Amino acid sequence: MKVIDKDKKGETHRGYYWVYQNSLKKIAFFDYQEGRGREGPMVILEIFKGYLQTDGYAAYDIFDKRPGITLIHCMAHACRMFHEELDNDYDRASYALNDIPKLYTIERISRESRLNYEEPKVVRTAKAAPILKGMWLWMQQQYVHVLPKSAIGKALAYSLERWHKLSLYTTDSFCPLLVIICLKAI
């Protein structure tokens, strides 16, 4: 976003809001930073422990090496890349998008059923994990048939490179599939 600097009359610079969410309390926190470097998140998350769900931006990679933090990625960001390709490679993009609503439905039904602590993990393992495995196999098969620098190639690569962290939510009942609180706050 464009930001006016009081020390530079008539000039603007680009600024960034970093959005953090607390899934348990269902709140979002906005932190303004002048840049997109990892300095801002490093300060905010200095004492954080737990699951850190991100969009796959490289600035967050450092947290993957921090003890006590498990880095996971948001399915909505992978989904968006395929959605943007519907006009260019409809067959592949729509096929990739076909299974994602099934994952959302599994999450919605689990949430509405008010399952106890362990039950969402059991449901995810039984229902979501096979869908995710099929998606991963299909993406691997498709990737060898597209140009890596094409938009669909980049969408496939984005998901494949992050697949472990995209599907890690199935291993714990508290991990969300997507950063919905942050997405709604924006």
Image (tube, rainbow, N blue to C red):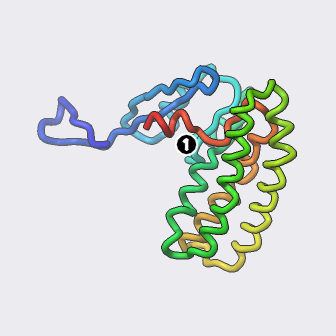
Q: Secondary structure at mark 1?
A: helix
50 horizontally vs 45: left or right = right
Q: Estimate the x, y position of residue 57 in percent, counting from the top left.
A: 55, 47
In the image, taking residue 12 as reference, residue 25 lies left or right, namely right
Q: How many marks?
A: 1
* Residue 67 visible: no
For badge 1, the amino acid type reads Ala
Q: Residue at x 82, y 36 (%)?
A: 121
The spot of residue 26 in percent (x, y) is 57, 24
Classify 147 as above or below 61: below
> How packed is label 1: few (under 14 Cα within 10 Å), some, or many (20 or more)?
some
| Residue at x 84% of width, y 31% of height | 119
Residue 80 occupies which quadrant of the picture?
A: bottom right
Q: On the image, numbered disc 1 is attached to which residue? A: 59
Q: Quadrant of residue 51?
A: top right
Residue at 50%, 64% (x, y): give it. 84
Residue closer to the observer: 62 or 111: 111
Residue occupying image coordinates x 81% and y 38%: 171
Q: Looking at the picture, tell me which residue is in the foreground, 50 or 104.
A: 104
Residue 106 seen from this side: yes
Residue placed most toward the observer, 47 or 107: 107
Judge whether 25 appears above or below 55 on screen.
above
Q: Quadrant of the C terminus?
A: top left
x, y (%) of residue 114? 74, 27
Q: Give percent across and percent down for residue 37.
A: 48, 40
**Quarter-of-image position of residue 24:** top right
| Above or below for 15 versus 147 | above
Q: Quadrant of the N terminus?
A: top left
